[in-house]
Amino acid sequence: MKNIVLIIVFSVTLSYTTVAQKISSGDVPTLVNETFKSKFSIAEKTSWSLDYDKYKAEFKVSKSQYSATFDKDGKWLKTETFLKPSDLPKAVKEKLTKEFGELSDYKIEDPEKVESKDGGINYEMEVIKGSVTYKMIVSEKGEIVSKEEKNTN
């Protein structure tokens, strides 16, 4: 019985993992490639992956790292810009201070600026305070869009 439960848990976990696979630029549909080139004409060192029906380009512009996601018809869905915690806007930093105290009381990990057609600009990050980690999304105006405790087990 224990083995059956473990097999079920393992199967469910596997089904929720990312299925993204690296692909060559030649495997990217023309419409996706055209939209990417028009939106990010100065992109350097681009690599592509396919996650179900979404195409994701990871690239650099100057020294900054980005990723952009497109649907199969070439429609731009979102762009993520990888940041240092010090690069977060003032409104976001102020909201984090109100929520968690002084910066010495918590740690920010993996901050990203996320721009999307429907959602505007938000900042996603993990905030660690003590032994608790939160996945946070904060708007550019400093409003909390979501805050969920991340299970670290």
Image: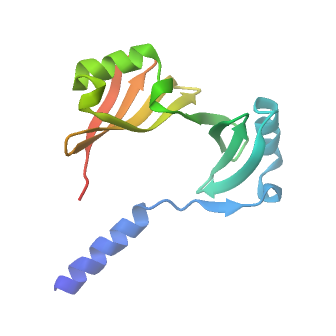
Q: Is residue 22 above or below residue 107?
A: below
Does residue 141 appear in this view? Answer: no
Q: Is residue 32 above or below residue 108?
A: below
Does residue 22 appear in this view? Answer: yes
Return the residue nearer the eye: 69 or 47: 47
Residue 143, quarter of the rendered image: top left
Return the residue nearer the eye: 122 or 105: 105
Residue 4 on image: x %, y %: 23, 83
- Identify which residue is drawn at 66% across, 61% down: 22
Residue 16, quarter of the rendered image: bottom left
Residue 150 falls left or right of residue 109: left
Return the residue nearer the eye: 108 or 134: 108
Residue 79 on image: x %, y %: 61, 34
Q: Is residue 92 above or below residue 70?
A: above
Residue 127 falls left or right of residue 91: left
Residue 71 on image: x %, y %: 65, 44
| Figure disc tally | 0
Q: Residue furthest left?
A: 1
- Identify which residue is drawn at 73% across, 33% down: 62
Residue 81 on image: x %, y %: 58, 34
Q: Identify the image's colour scheme: rainbow, by chain, secondary structure or one colour.
A: rainbow
Quadrant in the picture for the N terminus: bottom left
Quadrant in the picture for the C terminus: bottom left
- Identify which residue is drawn at 77% across, 60% down: 24
